[in-house]
Amino acid sequence: MQKKLSVVAATLVLLSLSGCGLFSEKADETKGWSATKLYSEANEELEGQHYERAIQLYEKLESSYPFGTYAQQAQMQIAYAYYKSQDQAQALAAVERFIKLHPNHANVDYMYYLRGLINFNDQIGFLNFIYEQDATERDPKATREAFAAFKQLVEKFPNSKYTPDAIDRMRYLVNAMASYEVHVARYYYRRGAYLAAANRAMGIMNDYRDSPAIEEALFIMIRSYDKLGMTELRDDTTRVFKLNYPTSKFLDEGKKADRQWWQLWN
């Protein structure tokens, strides 16, 4: 009987303590904060590179003041914070959400630009490993998506302050895509797939006419046609090559053995 009374007494004590708040959930420190304070605190966290905390505060601001002047800006900052924290998927989702909700926003051009930057950074990571993996096992999806995003910005907002930088990045991306195609053409040539190498190089000629990669693409075509016994195509391509690149390093190397020629690509 005494044991039962002790249990009851302990239970009553716990309930009493709970009522006093000792076991209550942690208080929300942002309770009662104005939109201005939430936005200011979130910006400070963002500047301090505390991205997770910044995102929490921006989300709190958006949910507490959905129709206020800061709500849309908070949505943009959330996308930027995810981008800075290298969370590509969440950053892109936040960008797409903003563009869908606010297609006519005064600063929507920035979101198109940010979408390009997110994919551009992922593409840089792709290039860092381009020579460490089999070229045919990778799909430069991020490169194409970054180019498409920047292109959309340039076409929709030709007078945007972000457009000049987007154009510069597009040029870089074109060269990156052309370099990838050259790398694949080399792969085919090295493995004796000369027709595939020639066709891949021809694709570079058609798709990336102003790229520096054209020089090597032409040379791969010359070597591939030579291996295939297509002497007429080889000679025609050689004439075009010499006309456009009279001092090319490939001309001298092409006269040497294949083993020495490969050293250019190692």
Image: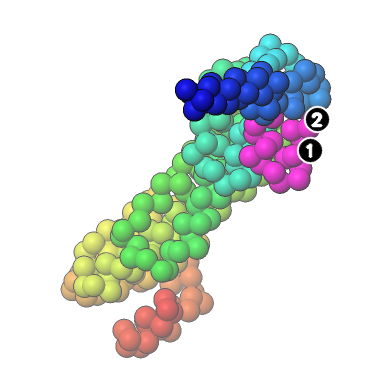
**Magenta stretch bounds:** 39-61
Q: For the C terminus, which image quadrant?
A: bottom left
Label 2 crowd bin: few (<14), some (14–19), many (20+), radius 10 Å: some
Residue drawn 55% across and 26% down? 6
Q: What element carries label 2?
A: helix
Q: In which quarter of the image is residue 156?
A: top right
Residue drawn 49% across and 28% down? 3
Compared across the picture, whether 71 is left or right of 154 comes to right
Residue 239 screen position, x and y as percent: 37, 70
CB within 8 Å, label 2 to label 1? yes
Rounded to the nearest whole Å, what is the CA distance between mark 2 and mark 1? Answer: 6 Å
Q: Residue 44 carries which label?
A: 1
The residue type indicated by label 1 comes to Glu
**Disc 2: which residue:** 40
Residue 45 screen position, x and y as percent: 74, 39
Say whether residue 73 is magenta.
Answer: no
Question: Quick check: 126 above or below 168?
Answer: below
